[in-house]
Each structure stands twice: as structure tokens, then as C-alpha cells.
């Protein structure tokens, strides 16, 4: 009997394949967007972990300088003499031509095999790496970049991440001009040894435990959290489709459930059969969604890789690996989403009396009390958003605020549309128009979920589009300020740089050294740049706030500028003292904007920088020259010094590269916005299609009174457009609030800078056009069906008791 009852119950789907398709496709799309984002995140994090284990040897404890200035060689010797197994590392950025490489110098004789990152399997390998001229161990991609820019032999190793190179520690010391100052020590604890004993032997160092050093992963956390938020938003939008389809299926099977209960099928058996059906649907949708998510992630990963490399210097492969964590998460979300969609229907099933009326109701027809309860819940979410905005802090609070804002607006939408249609009905003249608005109100319960999905998608598009466009406009203006020099050159050696400094005066208006060093300031690794005393900086540098004579203080070596990230994160503002590496005390005199940089940065006078840190690289310069003379200066540099074309970059090319990186940064965001809108359009289509099958009792009397089927179809199109327009009008303020939160709260918490909000009404018009096309497409099939319906089908509605 159980098998027969299960066949009877599932026969519903055989007669309503479109409804089944909507349910499966809706959950598959939701799962695909979620699992695709998780696949991208998992691949990126695996890449960070691999890079950290190879480049930072973070599988073992590390010893770092307590002052952030490096570890003297005598400290290393002292630790070795006391029996501690430590291996020295010297690392830093080094330029091979115009390519910047992370250079890691190691001692292969003391470095443990499990964290070395490349193999030395024979004495010949050891001699090649450490003896003679030495050897650079790089990936194939890096080898192609630096070929011809170094005399060191290259060895290809697939285990080495891109844009990095291993070299013998003595060669790294020479190239980086460290003069024996070690970056860190890798500690191999012996069984039973006490790592804390390090403090007694060498109080100058700190022990950083294994696994704590993964700076790139911490920098990109905000980026991946953004992706996860968009994936979850898309999942929720897709969930509305499933919720609508399941609600309708339960409404249409009420008579079947009543009959099955009446002939002896217990409530527990009926529930078990429904759970089994649910599991099959969830598994089918989940598998399809994971496959689609893999395809989506494969298409988007190259753009993500370019973004992470451009913004954070993180090397992520452009190909995707099948990782159990993300496909398992995708299947789990499919089951969770399906369970959530069926939960209310199960609750109704358990409360339904055995002999409850089997009269079909309009799909998801909610009572007025339920509508008000939903609106009150929405207001509670909006109140929560306000409280989070006033008292919350941190990135999680920012995203919680966004969630409360979007959910609150979505829950209020049905009541707002009901009031809108009621107002339109009260202002109507003529029976047909009055019926049109009354019928629209009657349809709202069935369309509310699809319209809520549309509101979320439109709001997300408006909000994120406003954020991206504001960022683009601000970023381009900031580039014009920061990239003021007409030419940027990079010398190949320090001797060549010295010759250039003697040759350039008189041929260009001014020479702007671009010299920098790295060091630990306020507990974080930052870059310290030196700037010349030149009107270029006084006229163009984007200062947020500062003292009146800040440039004079900077050029005199008494003051320093900090970027907005350091100012917001560490609360370091004008008038405060700042301790730079080596105990150099300077006074902060100003704060400048530094978009696109996730880390803190300090600017001091270039003469003071060279005096305090004499070993800094002095290879890069900006040249101020009349624009019409730029090509001549470039030609003279090539002829007189033999500089390669890649070592001379004009302002326009640099801006073009920067803009290209910027555009790649938001490729994934734009794609997710489009996909979310497409899912919302499918939700609208699904709702319209399923409603058209149960609306004949409402349409038949109007047709019988003389309204043609073609006119009914036109009214259906007008109804869809009216609901679309009302939803879009409500989505604009919600989207702008979303943009404001992203710019003033989430962006500051995630990246450390705040952007001005700029409105772009033309973008809204373009989005409205796309949404309009989606709304029209969603109603075409139901309207075509209505326009061609056989009159006998309409007449048949009068043969039944209603």
C-alpha cells in the first residue's frame, strides 16, 4: 500500500512537468551560484595555503625580530650554539627589469625538506644552487617573465608559486643589500624541547607559531567575504522560486492528501513519503547545481585570479580543481534550501484535519493578518539595520546590516504593493479598470515571492552598480592626481641609477625619486616611501586632512604623511608621533587617500629616507617633462643608456594598466549581478506560468461579460508591467541605501578607505530597461496561452461549483 500511495502522490509531477522543472531548476540555479562562489573561494584559499607553506615555511614555528628590523647574524649563531635547530631566511621584493619578484633566500643545508619548497636530491643540485653563480628556482611562468633580465641560471620547479623565486641566502643578501640582516628564522623543534627557551637565549626575537603567517589570506578575507555575500544573495533569490513551486504543489495536492488520509495512510507515513520525495528532488537539484557551479566558477576564476594578483599580489591559478569541501557545501545548501522551502507546507500538512476541504485556493493566498505580520517582521529587520548601523562594528556587522536592510525591504514589499493597488483601485473610473486593480491585488499573494526576488536583484544591482561607478569615478580622478609624472623609468643597477641621476637634470623639468623600504610600524608590515620637495606633490597629491605647512615638514624630515588605511585602522592622525623602523620618531602632519591598497603606508622626505635607510633600492624615478618632449626623452634614454622599452613607462600606459586592473576587479561582481537578475526573472516567469493555470475561474466571468481573449492578454501584460514598475520604484531607494552602507561601512571595514557616493541615474535607466525586458519575457508564455485558450475551457469553469 505504501508503494501505491507513493506512486499516487508523485503522479502530480507527471501532469505538471513545468512546475517540477521550476522547482528543480530554481534550486539548481541557487545551488550553482552558491557552489560556484565557494569553489572560487576554496581554490583561492588553497592557493594561499600552498604559497604560505612554500614561501613562508609556515608549517613550522618562525622567529622574527621583536623590533621588526631583522635579525642580526650573531643572534642566529647564538641560537645554533645553544642547540636550537634554526634555519635563516632573507626575503624581499627584487626587480628583474620591470618585473617585481618576491625573492626568498634560504640555506638548503639547514632548511627542513618539508618546508623548503623545492627538491635538492643530489650533490650536483646542491652545487648548482649554492655554488658558483648560484641559481634561481622559479615557476615556468616566472621564468618567462624574467628571462633575459638576469645572469643567474634558472631552474623550473612547479611547486614554486608564480612571481616568486628561491635563491641561496648569500645571493639574496647581496641582491637585497641586507648586509647579513636576516628576515626570519625557521625553527624545527626537537622532540621534548621547549620552544619557550628561545626567549632565554635570544630575547631579541619573538616566536610566531606554525600556521600564523599567511598575510595574503588575511588581506583577501574581505574580498572572499564579499563574494560569499553575493553568492548567498543569489541563493536566497533562487530559493524564492523553489518556495513558490513547493507551496503551489502542496495547494494542488490537498485533495490527494485528504483522500490518502481517509483511506488509511497515516500522517507519519505520508510525511515519510514526502521527505523521501524531498530528498530525491534535493539530490537531483544539488548535483545539477554543483555541476553548473563548477562551469560558472571555471568561467569566472581567471577574472578572480587577475583581480587578486592586481589588488593583493596573490598568485591564484586560473584553473579549477575539484575539491570536496565546496561540492559538499553545495549539496548541503541544496538540501537545506529544499527543506526550508518545504517547511511551511509540512507544518500545514500536520495541522490539516483529515476531512479538511479539498477546495483549491489561490496559490499561497495569505490572509490580511499574515500580510500585516510579514510587514511587521520587515519593520523589525529594518529597525535591526538601524541599530547595527548606529552601534555595530566590524565587517560581519556590516554584512548583517545589509542582510537586515534587504530582508526588511523584501518583507514589506507585498503590503506596499497591496496598498498601491488599493489606492489605484480607489482612484479608478470605470468597471474594467476597477476590476483590473482588484484582480491585481488578488494575484499579489501568488506573485509576492517572485516580486520579492525581483526587488532583491534590482536593489543589489543598483547598490553594487552605484558603488562600482562611484569607485570608478573617484579612482580615475585619484589616478590623475597620483600619476602626475609624464614618464616613469626603472634602472637595472644602482650604478646605472647613479648615472641617470647625473644625466637627467637639465633635460627634464624635475626628477622624482620613487624610493621605498618596508618595515614594521604599529605591529604591521608597511611600505615607507620617500618624496622629493617638488611642486608636483604640493599641487596633485590627494590630501584628506592635514596641517597647513605639511609639505615643508615632510621635506625637512620632521613630518610624515600616512594613508587613509593606517589612519582609520590605527587611529593615527595629524599631530601624533609615529615610530618608524630603527626608532625614527616623526610627527604625522597629514592623511592622504590611497585607493586600491589594502595595507598601511607612510610618506617621508626622500633625503631623510635615504639618510635613515642607506641601503634602500634607488632604481625607480618619475620624470616631469613637457608632454611634447616625452617621446624625445624616451628615445634619448634608450640610445644613451640602452634601457629596454619595458623599463620606460609613459603616464598614459600606466593609467591604462591601472584602469584595466580596476575593471578586472569587479568582473565577478558584475557577473553575479547579472546572474542574480536572471534568476529573479526566472522566478517571475515561473510564478506567472503557474498562476495562469489556476486563474481561469477569475478570468472566465470577465470573458463571459464580453471582454475578448486578446484584451485579457493585453491586460495581463499591463499588470506585469505595473507590478514591475512599482517594484523598480521601490528598489531604487533600497539600492541607494545598500550603496551607502557598502561605501561608508563595509568598504571602510574591509579595505580601510571611504569613497564618496555619486549617483548615476542613467545606469538606473539601463537597468530598468533590462528588467523591463525580463518582465515582458516572463509573461509572454502565459499571455500567449491565454490569448489562444479554447472558449470551451473558459465555459467549463461555470460547470463546477465555486
Image (cartoon, grey):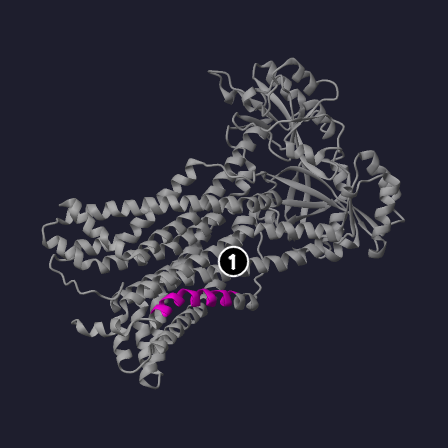
| Residue 786 visible somewhere in the drawing | yes
For the record, the magenta segment spans 767-785
| x and y, in percent, of residue 646 in the image | 76, 42
**Residue at x 43%, y 65% (from the top left corner):** 777
Residue 186 or 101: which is nearer the viewer? 101
Judge whether 70 appears above or below 625 on screen: above
Task: Report the label total.
Answer: 1
Dominant secondary structure of the residues highlighted in magenta in the image: helix
Relative to residue 422, is residue 78 drawn left or right? right
> Label 1: how many residues lie within 10 Å, few (<14), some (14-19) or many (20+)?
many
> What is the x, y in percent for residue 122?
63, 14
As for residue 374 lying within the magenta part, the answer is no
Q: Position of residue 161 (x, y in %)?
A: 60, 33
Look at 36% across and 67% down and name the residue there: 782
The C terminus sits in image quarter: bottom left
Image-based side of 164 in relation to 274, left or right: right
Q: Is residue 800 above or below residue 756?
A: below
40 or 291: which is nearer to us? Answer: 291
Q: Quadrant of residue 549?
A: bottom right
Residue 390 at least partly seen: no
Q: Quadrant of the N terminus?
A: top left
- What residue is shown with label 1? 464
> Which residue ends up furthest to the right in the rendered image?
506
Q: Secondary structure at mark 1?
A: helix
* Side (left or right) of 359 relative to 180: left
Does the magenta run of residues contain 770?
A: yes
Amino acid at each position: 500500500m505504501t508503494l501505491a500511495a507513493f506512486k499516487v502522490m508523485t503522479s502530480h509531477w507527471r501532469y505538471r512537468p513545468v512546475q517540477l522543472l521550476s522547482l528543480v531548476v530554481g534550486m539548481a540555479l541557487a545551488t550553482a551560484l552558491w557552489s560556484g562562489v565557494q569553489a572560487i573561494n576554496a581554490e583561492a584559499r588553497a592557493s594561499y595555503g600552498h604559497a604560505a607553506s612554500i614561501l613562508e615555511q609556515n608549517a613550522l614555528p618562525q622567529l622574527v625580530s621583536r623590533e621588526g628590523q631583522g635579525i642580526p647574524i650573531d643572534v642566529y649563531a647564538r641560537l645554533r650554539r645553544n642547540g636550537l635547530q634554526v634555519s635563516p631566511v632573507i626575503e624581499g621584493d627584487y626587480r628583474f627589469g620591470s618585473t617585481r619578484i618576491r625573492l626568498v633566500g634560504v640555506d638548503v643545508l639547514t632548511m627542513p625538506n618539508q618546508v623548503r619548497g623545492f627538491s635538492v636530491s643530489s650533490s650536483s643540485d646542491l652545487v648548482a644552487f649554492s655554488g658558483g653563480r648560484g641559481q634561481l628556482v622559479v615557476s615556468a611562468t616566472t621564468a618567462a617573465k624574467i628571462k633575459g633580465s638576469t645572469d643567474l641560471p634558472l631552474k623550473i620547479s612547479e611547486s614554486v608559486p608564480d612571481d616568486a623565486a628561491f635563491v641561496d641566502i648569500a645571493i639574496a643578501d647581496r641582491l637585497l643589500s641586507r648586509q647579513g640582516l636576516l628576515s626570519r628564522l625557521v625553527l624545527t623543534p626537537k622532540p621534548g624541547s621547549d620552544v619557550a627557551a628561545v626567549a632565554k637565549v635570544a630575547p631579541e626575537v619573538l616566536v610566531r607559531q606554525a600556521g600564523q603567517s599567511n598575510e595574503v589570506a588575511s588581506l583577501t578575507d574581505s574580498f572572499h567575504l564579499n563574494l560569499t555575500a553575493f553568492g548567498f544573495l543569489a541563493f536566497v533569490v533562487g530559493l524564492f522560486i523553489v518556495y513558490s513551486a513547493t507551496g503551489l504543489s502542496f495547494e494542488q495536492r490537498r485533495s490527494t492528501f485528504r483522500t490518502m488520509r481517509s483511506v488509511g495512510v497515516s500522517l507519519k507515513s505520508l510525511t515519510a513519503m514526502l521527505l523521501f520525495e524531498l530528498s530525491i528532488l534535493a539530490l537531483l537539484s544539488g548535483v545539477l547545481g554543483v555541476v553548473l557551479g563548477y562551469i560558472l566558477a571555471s568561467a569566472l576564476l581567471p577574472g578572480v585570479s587577475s583581480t587578486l594578483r592586481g589588488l593583493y599580489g596573490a598568485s591564484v591559478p586560473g584553473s579549477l580543481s575539484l575539491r570536496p569541501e565546496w561540492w559538499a557545501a553545495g549539496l548541503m545548501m541544496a538540501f537545506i534550501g529544499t527543506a526550508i522551502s518545504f517547511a511551511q507546507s509540512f507544518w500545514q500538512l500536520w495541522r490539516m484535519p483529515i476531512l479538511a476541504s479539498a477546495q483549491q485556493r489561490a496559490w499561497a493566498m495569505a490572509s490580511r493578518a499574515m500580510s500585516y505580520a510579514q510587514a511587521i517582521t520587515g519593520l523589525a529587520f529594518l529597525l535591526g539595520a538601524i541599530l547595527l548601523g548606529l552601534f555595530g562594528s566590524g565587517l560581519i556587522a556590516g554584512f548583517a546590516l545589509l542582510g537586515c536592510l534587504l530582508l526588511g525591504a523584501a518583507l514589506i514589499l507585498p503590503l506596499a504593493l497591496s496598498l498601491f493597488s488599493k489606492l489605484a483601485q480607489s482612484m479608478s473610473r470605470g468597471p474594467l479598470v476597477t476590476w483590473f486593480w482588484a484582480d491585481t491585488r488578488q494575484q499579489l499573494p501568488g506573485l509576492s515571492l517572485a516580486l520579492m526576488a525581483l526587488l532583491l536583484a534590482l536593489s543589489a544591482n543598483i547598490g553594487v552598480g552605484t558603488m562600482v561607478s562611484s569607485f570608478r569615478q573617484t579612482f580615475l580622478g585619484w589616478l590623475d592626481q597620483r600619476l602626475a609624472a609624464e614618464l616613469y623609468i626603472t634602472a637595472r643597477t644602482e650604478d646605472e641609477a647613479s648615472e641617470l641621476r647625473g644625466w637627467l637634470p637639465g633635460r627634464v623639468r624635475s626628477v622624482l625619486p620613487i624610493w621605498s623600504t618596508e618595515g614594521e610600524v604599529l605591529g604591521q608590515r608597511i611600505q615607507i616611501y620617500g618624496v622629493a620637495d617638488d611642486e608636483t606633490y604640493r599641487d596633485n597629491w590627494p590630501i584628506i586632512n592635514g596641517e597647513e605647512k605639511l609639505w615643508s615638514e615632510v621635506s625637512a624630515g620632521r613630518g610624515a604623511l600616512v594613508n587613509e588605511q593606517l589612519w582609520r585602522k590605527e587611529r593615527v592622525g595629524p599631530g601624533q608621533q609615529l615610530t618608524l623602523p630603527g626608532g625614527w620618531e616623526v610627527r604625522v602632519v597629514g592623511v592622504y587617500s590611497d585607493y586600491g591598497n589594502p595595507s598601511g603606508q607612510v610618506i617621508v622626505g626622500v633625503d631623510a629616507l635615504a639618510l635613515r635607510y642607506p641601503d634602500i633600492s634607488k632604481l625607480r624615478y618619475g620624470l616631469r617633462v613637457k608632454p611634447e618632449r616625452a617621446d624625445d626623452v624616451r628615445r634619448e634614454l634608450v640610445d644613451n643608456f640602452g634601457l629596454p622599452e619595458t623599463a620606460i613607462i609613459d603616464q598614459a600606459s600606466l593609467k591604462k594598466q591601472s584602469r584595466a586592473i580596476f575593471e578586472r576587479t569587479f568582473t565577478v561582481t558584475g557577473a553575479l549581478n547579472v546572474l542574480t537578475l536572471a534568476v529573479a526573472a526566472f522566478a517571475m516567469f515561473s510564478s506567472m506560468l503557474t498562476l495562469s493555470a489556476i486563474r481561469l475561474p477569475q478570468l472566465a466571468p470577465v470573458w463571459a461579460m464580453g471582454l475578448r481573449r486578446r484584451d485579457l492578454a493585453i491586460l495581463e501584460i499591463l499588470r506585469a508591467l505595473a507590478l514591475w514598475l512599482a517594484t523598480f520604484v521601490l528598489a531604487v531607494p533600497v539600492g541607494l541605501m545598500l550603496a551607502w552602507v557598502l561605501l561608508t561601512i563595509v568598504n571602510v571595514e574591509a579595505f580601510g578607505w571611504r569613497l564618496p557616493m555619486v549617483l548615476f541615474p542613467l545606469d538606473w535607466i539601463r537597468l530598468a530597461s533590462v528588467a523591463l525586458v525580463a518582465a515582458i519575457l516572463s509573461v509572454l508564455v502565459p499571455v500567449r496561452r491565454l490569448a489562444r485558450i479554447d472558449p470551451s475551457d473558459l465555459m467549463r469553469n461555470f460547470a463546477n461549483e465555486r
